[in-house]
C-alpha cells in the first residue's frame, strides 16, 4: 500500500559556506517547515570588514523568487557587516533554486527534506574543513510543525539545531512526524462528499418508502 507522496528538496549549503572562506565570519540560518511543505526562513551572513567601505558578504535572490525572497543589509554592533536573506512560503524546489542561484552546488554542502506519509526526514552535511576554528561561528536551526522524534542535533520539541564546527564535516540528520496538510484536506473532503452522498441516498430511500406507503393506503381506501 502506498505510503503517500514523496517530496524532495535539496538546499545547497554552499549558499552559506562559500561566503565563509575568508575573514572572521558569523552565519545564522533559520528554517521553519509548515504542514503543507512550505518553507519560511532567513539567512544572515556577517564578516569583519577587510577594508574601508567593505559591505561584507552579499547574498543573491533569483528573479523568479523576487516576490517571496529579498536581501537586505545587515550589521552588528561590533562592526561586522553583510546581508540578510529572508524568504516566505517556498516549496522545496524553490528553496533549491534559491540556493543554486546564489552560489551553485559544489557537492560538499547539502541539506535535504523528504516526506514519506506522515514522516519527514532531514539529512545533509556541512563541510567547513577549509575554515579556521577561531574565525567562524555558524548556527543552523530548523523548526517543524510536529515533534522531532530523533536526530543528531540539539532537539527540543518541534525544533532541532546544530553548530557546525570549522575544520570538519558536520552531518545533519533529523526525523519529524506530522501529517501532510494537503493529504488531510483531501481525505476530509472525501469524507464530506461520501457522507453527503450517503445522506442523499438515505433521503431518496425514505422518500420512496413514504411514497410507497401512501400509495398502498390510497389503494386500500379505494
Image (tube, grey):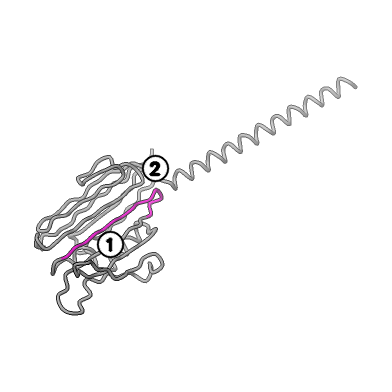
Q: Where is residue 52, by image quadrant?
A: bottom left
Residue 81, given in percent of the width and then of the height, sits at 22, 70
Residue 157 horizontal/vertical position (percent): 29, 42
Residue 71 against residue 89 in the figure, above or below: below
Q: Which mark is residue 179?
A: 2
In magenta, the rendered stretch is 25-38
Q: Is 140 within the magenta?
A: no
| Residue at figure coordinates x 19%, y 45% from the top left | 152
Near mark 1 (Cα within 10 A), the count class, few <14, some 14-19 or many ≥20, is: many
**Quadrant the N terminus occupies:** top left
Q: Nearer the viewer, residue 197 or 86?
A: 86
Residue found at the far bottom of this picture? 52
Measured in 3D between alpha carbons, the distance from the residue under mark 1 to the one under mark 2, in whole angstroms, is 27 Å
Q: Earlier in the sequence, mark 1 or mark 2?
A: 1
Q: Is residue 35 in the magenta section?
A: yes
Q: Main secondary structure of the magenta part?
A: strand
- Where residue 113 appears, as percent x and y from the top left, is 30, 51
Q: Secondary structure at mark 2?
A: loop
At a point 56% along the width and 40% down the height, the residue shown is 192
Q: Quadrant of the C terminus?
A: top right
The tag on residue 62 is none
Q: Residue furthest top?
A: 220
Q: Residue furthest front?
A: 77
Task: Residue 43: give its label.
Answer: 1
Q: Please state the horizontal and vertical placement of residue 162, each as a whole percent of the image.
A: 20, 51
Residues 218 and 162: in front is 162
Closest to the camera, between mark 1 and mark 2, is 1
Is the residue under label 2 in contact with that under label 1 (CB below 8 Å)? no
> Does 167 appear above or below 116?
below
Amino acid at each position: 500500500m502506498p505510503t503517500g507522496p514523496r517530496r524532495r528538496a535539496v538546499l545547497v549549503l554552499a549558499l552559506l559556506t562559500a561566503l565563509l572562506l575568508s575573514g572572521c565570519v558569523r552565519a545564522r540560518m533559520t528554517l521553519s517547515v509548515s504542514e503543507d511543505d512550505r518553507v519560511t526562513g532567513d539567512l544572515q551572513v556577517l564578516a569583519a570588514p577587510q577594508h574601508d567601505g567593505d559591505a561584507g558578504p552579499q547574498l543573491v535572490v533569483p528573479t523568479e523568487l523576487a516576490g517571496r525572497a529579498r536581501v537586505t543589509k545587515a550589521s552588528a554592533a561590533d562592526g561586522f557587516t553583510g546581508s540578510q536573506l529572508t524568504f516566505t512560503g517556498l516549496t522545496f524546489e524553490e528553496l533549491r533554486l534559491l540556493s543554486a542561484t546564489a552560489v551553485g552546488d559544489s557537492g560538499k554542502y547539502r541539506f535535504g527534506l523528504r516526506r514519506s506519509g506522515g514522516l519527514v526526514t532531514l539529512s545533509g552535511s556541512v563541510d567547513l574543513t577549509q575554515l579556521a576554528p577561531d574565525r567562524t561561528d555558524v548556527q543552523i536551526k530548523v523548526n517543524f510543525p510536529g515533534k522531532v522524534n530523533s536526530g543528531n542535533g540539539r532537539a527540543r520539541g518541534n525544533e532541532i539545531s546544530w553548530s557546525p564546527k570549522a575544520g570538519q564535516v558536520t552531518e545533519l540528520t533529523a526525523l519529524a512526524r506530522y501529517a501532510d496538510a494537503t493529504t488531510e484536506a483531501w481525505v476530509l473532503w472525501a469524507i464530506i462528499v461520501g457522507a453527503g452522498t450517503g445522506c442523499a441516498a438515505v433521503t431518496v430511500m425514505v422518500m420512496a418508502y413514504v411514497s410507497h406507503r401512501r400509495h398502498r393506503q390510497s389503494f386500500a381506501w379505494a
